[in-house]
Image (cartoon, grey):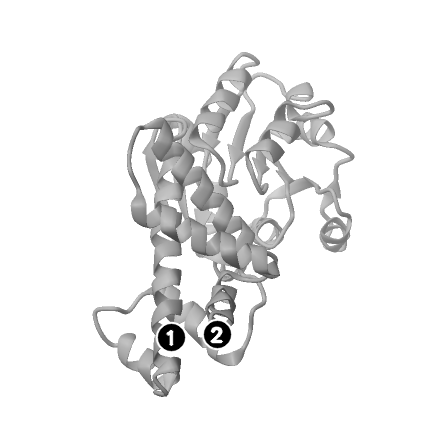
């Protein structure tokens, strides 16, 4: 079975490498050539376009930044749709609008192609370690067929519902993560302003009810001044926008998420978008 992989960014590249380690035969495509050349060096075939990758594989994975990117790569000129054949499976592991995901699945179904939306959580660290959480939307029999692929890159793999459900669960996950990041940064900033040792505060919090993976993974980076992205701040803000968009479609109020989104927008406006989500602390530092 040949597997296509389109989108070799911070997450996609290590995911593709883990698939190679698990014995999958890959053909890949990315707009920038650096990660493609890195995979070429370990024997991975490069496709010339999304269409070319689709023509060469049985299962195709996309890992892209936002809804318009997936629409362009899958349905645009020279896109995946031009190279598909009946029986193929597209696994979109991007975080995009659930509505858009369902629309793409319906277009692909007209060509006999099945689709799973399977966004991930765990950041760059989880992608490198092959320990991602994967929330999948789609048909059970297609999910089961793709389980070997999922096991090569993740540890917690759950079919959460039909098409679009994976994206919905991911947006819920992102709401929880983003609010946790804001609370962590506010707590650390308050502690610093009060003149108390922030590192000791974090040590205590991590041993109590306030402990979380967010604090365990990101607070040490803040203390070390490491703002390199395991997940970019601008993408976190994009995910909050998508969650609020979904809430609007459902006529559902999310006041805390709305405020959190504004805080991330402030940070992005301060030029922090390409840094890791932990760089939100720098926006608080600017407040004094």
* Percent of width and height locating residue 263: 44, 56
Task: Provide the residue designation for mark 2.
Answer: 222
Residue named by callout 1: 188
- Residue 136 location (% of width, % of height): 40, 37
| Secondary structure under the numbered disc 2 in the rendered image | helix
At x 46%, y 68%, the residue is 284
Secondary structure of the residue carrying tag 1 is: helix
Q: On the picture, is 260 further left or further right than 206? A: right
CB contact under 8 Å: marks 1 and 2: yes
In the displayed structure, 57 sits above or below 237; it is above
Image quadrant assignment for residue 2:
top right
Q: Going by the picture, which residue comes out furthest to the left? A: 209
Question: Which label belongs to residue 144?
Answer: none
Res 179 → quadrant: bottom left
x, y percentage for residue 213?
36, 64
* Dot 2 alpha-carbon crowd within 10 angstroms: few under 14, some 14 to 19, many 20 or more: some
* Residue 188 x/y as whole percent: 38, 75
The residue nearer to you, when weighing 89 against 51, is: 51
**In the image as oriented, which residue stretches furthest toward the front?**
288
Of marks 1 and 2, the one in the foreground: 1
In this rendering, the count of numbered labels is 2
Q: Earlier in the sequence, mark 1 or mark 2?
A: 1
Compared to residue 283, the image places residue 95 above or below, namely above
Category of crowding for the residue at label 1, using alpha-carbon neighbours closer than 10 angstroms: few (below 14), some (14–19), many (at least 20): many
Report if residue 232 is visible in the image.
no
């Amino acid at each position: 079975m040949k597997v296509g992989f389109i989108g070799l960014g911070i997450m996609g590249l290590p995911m593709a490498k883990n698939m190679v380690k698990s014995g999958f035969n890959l053909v890949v495509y990315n707009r920038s050539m650096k990660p493609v050349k890195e995979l070429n060096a370990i024997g991975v075939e490069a496709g010339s376009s999304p269409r070319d990758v689709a023509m060469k594989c049985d299962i195709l994975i996309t890992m892209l930044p936002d809804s318009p990117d997936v629409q362009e790569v899958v349905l645009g000129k020279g896109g995946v749709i031009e190279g598909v054949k009946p029986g193929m499976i597209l696994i979109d592991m991007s975080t995009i609008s659930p509505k858009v995901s369902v629309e793409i699945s319906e277009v692909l179904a007209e060509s006999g192609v099945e689709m799973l939306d399977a966004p991930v959580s765990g950041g760059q660290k989880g992608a490198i370690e092959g320990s991602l959480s994967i929330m999948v939307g789609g048909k059970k029999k297609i999910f089961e067929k793709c389980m070997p692929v999922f096991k090569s890159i993740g540890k917690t793999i759950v079919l959460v519902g039909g098409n679009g459900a994976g994206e919905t669960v991911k947006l819920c996950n992102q709401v929880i993560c983003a609010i946790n990041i804001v609370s962590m940064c506010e707590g650390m900033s308050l502690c610093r302003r009060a003149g108390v040792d922030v590192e000791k505060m974090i040590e205590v919090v991590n041993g109590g009810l306030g402990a979380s993976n967010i604090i365990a993974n990101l607070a040490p980076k803040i203390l070390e001044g490491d703002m390199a992205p395991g997940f970019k701040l601008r993408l976190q803000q994009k995910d909050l926008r998508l969650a609020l968009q979904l809430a609007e479609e459902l006529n559902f109020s999310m006041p805390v998420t709305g405020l959190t989104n504004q805080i991330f927008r402030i940070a992005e406006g301060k030029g922090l978008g390409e840094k890791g989500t932990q760089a939100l602390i720098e926006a608080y530092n600017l407040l004094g």
